[in-house]
Image (cartoon, rainbow, N blue to C red):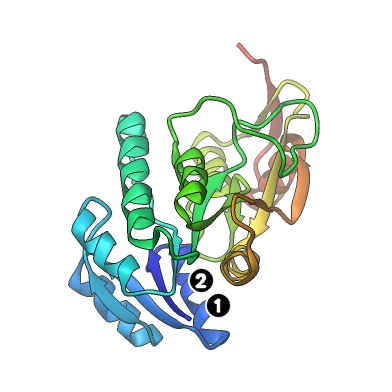
Amino acid sequence: MRVFVTGATGFIGSAIVQELLGAGHQVLGLARSEAAAQALTAAGAEAHPGALGDLDSLRRGAAAADGVIHAAYGHDFSAYEAAGQADKLAIETLGSALASSGRPLVVTAGLAGLALGRLGTEEDTPGPSPRLSEPAALALVAQGVRASVVRLAPSVHDHGDYGFVPTLINIARQTGVAAYVGEGLNRWSAVHRLDAAHLFRLALEHGVAGARYHGVADEGVRMRELAAIIGRHLGVPVASKSPA
């Protein structure tokens, strides 16, 4: 397949590109800079100039492809609702180029917002959230798009990770304490970046319209356990902090 990938040079997107190429697919990657275009070319993909907010570039990229993986997102937490609206518009634009074709569109979402206190399943519907990617994607099924959603664990880890766990490490390094809240029993799930990329490819190739797929390998890792490992590696004390 010829696959259009947004976020193709990002932490997860770059792994998706390699996964697709390794399986014999052609990749057209969205590139918002010359450096990104060069990185894609060096990886063996084709660069498609544009950006998440450039809807015409998204439409042209999707129209030229047999399928789309949408891995881009504006992670500006100071304008989170605006980022959600921009993502919704991008997904709707990608979907409009695939309408009535049965071609696949795999959209990235997260596990945050699912039910607390029990195992979250792929049948669960998330609560209200500023991130609108999942409902936007699934609404496209009625338009003849084979849309599905990959819900990623809060921690997608590998060398170069800059997300959840590295943030905890940096806090412990700055404060001199690896802390957790209360008894530290609240849990987080995780997945390796290469496993997540493999799931995206399987969803593209075999995914069912309207399905949700959980990108999780490590279930229920307690915060207390994370803090203990961080403390041991940094040589700092591990401590409980009250919720207050």
Question: Please, what secondary structure does the residue beneath circle 1 have?
Answer: helix
- Callout 2–callout 1 Cβ contact below 8 Å: yes
Task: Please state the horizontal and vertical placement of residue 55, each as a whole percent of the image.
Answer: 22, 54
The image quarter in which residue 85 lies:
top left
Question: Please, what secondary structure does the residue beneath circle 2 have?
Answer: helix
Three-letter code for the amino acid on which mark 1 is drawn: Glu
Residue 75 appears anywhere in the view: no
Q: In this view, does 15 lie to the left or right of 83?
A: right
The vertical placement of 241 against 47, above or below, is above
Q: Distance between the residues labelled 2 and 1?
A: 6 Å
Residue on which disc 1 sits: 19
Residue furthest top in the image: 244
Three-letter code for the amino acid on which mark 2 is drawn: Ala
Task: Please state the horizontal and vertical placement of residue 103, each as a whole percent of the image.
Answer: 48, 67
Report the residue at 27% width, 71% height from top.
36
The image quarter in which residue 132 lies:
top left
Task: Please state the horizontal and vertical placement of residue 86, each as a whole percent of the image.
Answer: 30, 41
Residue on which disc 2 sits: 15
Residue 128 appears anywhere in the view: yes
State the mark number for residue 242: none
Number of numbered callouts drawn:
2
Report the residue at 28% width, 77% height from top.
47
The vertical placement of 94 against 110, above or below, is below
Report the residue at 52% width, 45% height from top.
138
The vertical placement of 34 against 182, above or below, is below
User: Residue 113 versus residue 144: which sits nearer the camera?
Assistant: 144
Task: Give neighbour class at mark 2: few <14, some 14-19, many 20+ (Cα, 10 Å).
Answer: some
